Image (cartoon, helix red, strand yellow):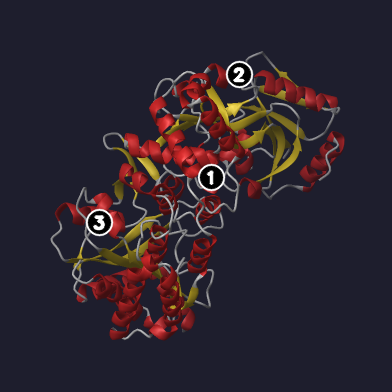
């Protein structure tokens, strides 16, 4: 069996990943036609390239169907319970930076911290008869963060896109979303809570902790790590 | 690991035992409407229960406990007084791999009877204690009413008391609030700045430059909270003496008679807890009358503070001291406030508890 390396199948994340490996003497490239998800690895032995959606890479790693993968550290934490029992971070890759944050309307002059958010949520529930809604697609991360902080009287509403628009559209009062420059937040009259950064994410190379590797796979892995300059 | 049929047989035995004690057997649906549970427990329950969706009913949950559906049933059509028993599986999602079973049997006993609440507390506790007698378990008890009464008796604003009551079940948040209200920790810098601006330029000017009004939370709501913060900033700190008393109560962990003595002393300085303390005394008498050895019973004023959100009075749990890895073999408590929340205006004093038959079997086998 060969080692399978999962890499995002399109866009800047894929290009930057290819560049990162190329800088370290390992060439990854797509093969076949523009639309075919096939790839090749040159410069090391026994490694196969698998092109996947970045969102599926955590699950495939945890299940052991791929042995290594590149994806956002936020996605791993969101999708895999007890992620560090199943996956190991090999190297942060220095791109794809994004922060998962909690933001509220800028005109909420009374809310700057989680403590304020909690108090505002209590008052909101008393006034409106339902819990203050926070729109997000990062349910696990947000829930664990708010539980840890002791914030109550909120509810999460699912939002898979255009999350910043939910406040204006009256489907949520606050949002928990990924931001890199904060521009979309500002355009939608939102501000970030001062202690509302849930996770600072970046593209990261992971390996699965699943057992069952052959000696050959272990040797190939060691050679790849050596080439990439990663101490294991 | 014992087989499911053995656990079911043990459950039935306990179910019959509770019926013999006068309880009416009841059943509840496995699929429960999610909104009631979400409303009660908040978003956290999503991590702990199995949520699924029904095309017609919307979000539903596999029942994470029996108490809530039994209370709902009773508040809709139950005659009083009433005693119920039930047996069946509950379902708890485990977010961590080393967690516990995600489905297990419970057999429970619930009393809806307002004539003598203290006697009802003793009845539930003694009935469960007797069923578990051969296992020689350690019993821990507590009473939320003491801490609640202590908070209500603080010499501070109603708003601060309400904030503390709201976070009684979140010890870290409670502590942070107490530190701030007591002046042990400074106000957040951002708040100090905002309040200074509001004083200097007025709230209207502050709001005008804060940004355009978006979303459902209105400008009036923001202004109302700023006013509340201004009021709070002007209120004197909770005194060091009262903070110390609260700390003593929170940390209180003694045998029941010693704890009672302690609380009597505390009540001299904080008379608001006196009725709750007298209730503990009457409960100990009632337990003693039912043959419970109260001299060795543990009492912890903070017992169950992180796990038992709907309990608001007497609470208890039974543990195997030789098996700290096991969950409590039985647990329960008083939940008067829950009946008020689910009763739409009506409420009734209620107390109950559950036994986990699988743990009873594990310990029985271990003893042989």
> What whole-number distance in Å separates the C-alpha atoms at marks 1 and 3?
29 Å
Q: Which residue is mark 2?
A: A183
> What whole-number distance in Å separates the C-alpha atoms at marks 1 and 2?
26 Å
Q: Which residue is mark 3?
A: B71
Q: Residues within 10 Å of mark 3 (few under 14, many from 20)?
A: many
Question: From the viewer's perspective, is the residue at label 1 or at label 2 nearer?
Answer: 2
B44 w.r.t. B70: above or below: above
Q: Are marks 2 and 3 on the same chain?
A: no
Q: Are marks 1 and 3 on the same chain?
A: no
Q: Nearer the viewer, residue A20 or B4?
A: A20
Question: In the rendered view, does B106 fall on the left or right side of B204?
Answer: left
Question: From the viewer's perspective, is the residue at label 2 or at label 3 nearer?
Answer: 2
Residue B189 in picture, x, y percent from top left: 61, 38
Residue B368 in picture, x, y percent from top left: 46, 84
Q: Nearer the viewer, residue A138 or A38?
A: A138
Q: Nearer the viewer, residue B188 or B236?
A: B236
B233 w.r.t. B68: above or below: above
Q: Is residue B80 visible?
A: yes
Question: In the rendered view, does B33 fall on the left or right side of B191?
Answer: left
Per the image, label 1 sits on a secondary structure element best described as helix
């Amino acid at each position: 069996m060969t080692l399978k390396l999962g890499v995002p199948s399109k866009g800047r994340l894929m290009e930057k990943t290819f560049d990162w490996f190329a800088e370290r003497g390992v060439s990854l490239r797509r093969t076949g036609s523009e639309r075919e998800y096939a790839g090749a690895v040159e410069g090391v032995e026994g490694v196969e390239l698998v092109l996947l959606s970045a969102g599926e890479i955590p699950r495939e790693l945890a299940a052991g169907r791929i042995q290594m993968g590149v994806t956002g550290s936020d996605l791993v934490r969101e999708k895999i319970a007890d992620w560090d029992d199943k996956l190991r971070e090999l190297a942060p890759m220095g791109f794809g930076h994004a922060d998962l944050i909690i933001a509220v309307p800028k005109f909420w002059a009374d809310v700057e911290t989680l403590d304020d958010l909690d108090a505002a949520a209590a008052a909101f529930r008393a006034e409106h008869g339902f819990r203050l809604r926070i729109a997000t697609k990062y349910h696990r991360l947000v829930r664990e963060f708010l539980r840890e902080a002791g914030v109550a009287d909120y509810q999460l509403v699912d939002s898979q896109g255009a999350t910043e628009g939910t406040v204006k559209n009256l489907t949520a009062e606050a949002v928990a979303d990924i931001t890199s420059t904060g521009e979309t937040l500002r355009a939608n009259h939102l501000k970030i809570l001062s202690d509302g950064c849930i996770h600072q994410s970046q593209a990261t190379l992971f390996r699965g902790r699943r057992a069952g590797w052959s000696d050959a796979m272990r040797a190939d892995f060691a050679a790849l790590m050596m080439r990439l300059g990663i101490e294991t | 690991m014992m087989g499911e049929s053995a656990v079911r047989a043990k459950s039935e035995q306990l179910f019959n035992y509770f019926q013999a004690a006068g309880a009416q057997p009841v059943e509840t649906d496995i699929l429960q409407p999610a909104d009631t549970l979400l409303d009660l427990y908040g978003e956290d329950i999503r991590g702990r229960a199995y949520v699924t969706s029904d095309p017609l009913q919307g979000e539903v949950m596999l029942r994470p406990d029996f108490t809530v559906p039994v209370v709902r049933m009773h508040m809709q059509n139950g005659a009083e007084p009433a005693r119920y028993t039930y047996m069946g599986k509950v379902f708890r999602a485990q977010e961590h791999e080393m967690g516990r079973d995600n489905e297990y049997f419970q057999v429970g006993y619930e009393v809806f009877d307002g004539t003598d609440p203290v006697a009802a507390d003793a009845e539930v506790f003694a009935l469960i204690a007797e069923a578990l007698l051969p296992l020689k378990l350690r019993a821990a008890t507590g009473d939320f009413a003491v801490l609640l009464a202590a908070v209500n008796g603080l010499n501070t604003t109603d708003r601060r008391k309400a904030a503390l009551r709201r976070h009684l079940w979140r010890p870290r948040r409670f502590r942070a609030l107490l530190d701030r209200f007591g002046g042990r920790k400074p106000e957040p810098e951002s708040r100090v700045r905002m309040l200074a601006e509001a004083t200097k330029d007025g709230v209207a000017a502050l709001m005008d430059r804060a940004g355009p009004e978006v979303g459902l939370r209105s400008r009036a709501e923001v202004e109302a909270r700023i006013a509340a913060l201004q009021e709070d900033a002007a209120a004197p700190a909770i005194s060091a003496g009262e903070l110390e008393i609260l700390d003593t109560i929170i940390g209180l962990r003694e045998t029941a008679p010693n704890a009672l003595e302690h609380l009597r002393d505390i009540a001299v300085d904080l008379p608001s807890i006196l009725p709750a303390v007298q209730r503990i005394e009457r409960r100990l008498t009632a337990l003693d009358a039912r043959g419970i050895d109260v001299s060795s019973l543990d009492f912890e004023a903070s017992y169950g503070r992180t796990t038992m959100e709907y309990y608001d009075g007497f609470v208890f749990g039974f543990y195997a001291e030789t098996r700290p890895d096991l969950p409590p073999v039985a647990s329960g408590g008083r939940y008067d406030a829950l009946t008020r929340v689910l009763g739409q205006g009506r409420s009734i004093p209620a107390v109950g508890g559950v036994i986990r038959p699988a743990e009873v079997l594990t310990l029985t086998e271990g003893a042989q």
